[in-house]
Image (cartoon, rainbow, N blue to C red):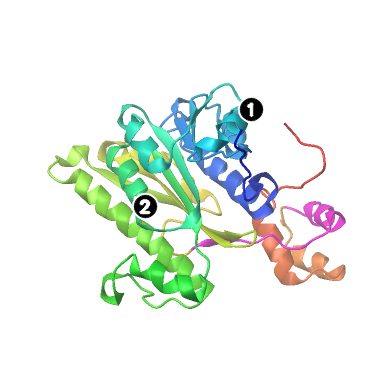
Amino acid sequence: MATFRPKLDYSIRPAKATVRRMIVEALARLDPLVPVDRYRYVGMGSIFFRDFQIIHRRLGISSMITLEGNAQAETRVRFNLPLACISPVMEYTDKALPKIRLEESPHIIWLDYESRVNQRLLSDVEEVISRCDPGSVLIVTSNADRPYDEERERWLSEFGDKSERPEPKEPRERADYALLSYRLLRERIGATVRSRNAGLPNDLHVSFRQMLHMVHSDGAQMLTVGGVLVATADDARWQECGVEDLEFTRAGEEACEIKIPPLTRREVQYLLARMPDAEGTFEDAAVRIGIPERDARQFASIYRYAPLFVEAEDW
């Protein structure tokens, strides 16, 4: 029997776990637009399924599909399914997505790639945006790190010459690659929305309302972009959701950077006891025990969502 070994255990990576919890917090706000338990969730669970578990527990979604491209993994994937409501589809996204009836009900689709933004990934995005029922959510995570020199030109060439790429046309720093990757995604999303709306009356138009623009790293730098397809008639209901009130949501090009400061468990408990920082003394208290101000500020920005890992699981 062929075996399958995943590259990473995403269930114990703290920055990714923080992003996951933030995503679910944002999704929970969508109830005025679509009652969240009516969504179908489509993800890429591998053999860990942490996103499926938290989405089921927090949002009550009971219609779920996991897309698994490696057919050799089927035995192990099915063994590790944590919920009876998860249906595995053992095909890569380019084959699986066209077979899902995205236009028949609202979907939350998290395309959680290990790869960089590339033409295949952008084709998946186009498939989702062009067919999804209004009210649906698309979230895309991809590698946005600086590539090795020999990979750099090959990757950039996928998007034409310099005149055809968005800025920064000659990325050098890590931040450049994250921004270029973001703009390539948003460019394809925007073009697909315009194509979808072409020829339709205004009341049938949809727009992509961005909720998420995050950059995090548990090693490689990763980019997460997400938003909702909102019909013109549903604009008032979208405003009721108040997604923008969450401190980590972003509607534009400025990313929310998720950084997990290196703190001991005792330091974390010390800082938690002073949150929320109503009296404005948090940073001074941190410095008194030797925690750098920068680390204290990072902790304050993510403490509600960052996991505290212990040896026993909570599920």
Mark 2 residue type = Arg
**Which residue position holds label 2?**
120
Left or right of 2? Residue 27 is left
Left or right of 253? Residue 303 is right
Q: Residue at x 72, y 57 (%)?
A: 277
Q: In this orientation, which residue lies closer to the viewer: 305 or 160?
A: 160
Q: Indicate whether residue 259 is drawn in magenta.
A: yes
Q: In this orientation, which residue lies closer to the viewer: 58 or 246?
A: 58
Q: Indicate whether residue 66 is drawn in magenta.
A: no
Mark 1 residue type = Phe
**Which residue position holds label 1?**
79
Q: Residue at x 74, y 59 (%)?
A: 279
Disc tally is 2
Which image quadrant: the N terminus? top right
Q: Residues within 10 Å of mark 2 (few under 14, many from 20)?
A: few
Magenta residues, start to end: 255-275
Left or right of 216? Residue 288 is right
> Which secondary structure, mark 1?
helix
Q: Position of residue 176 (x, y in %)?
A: 46, 73
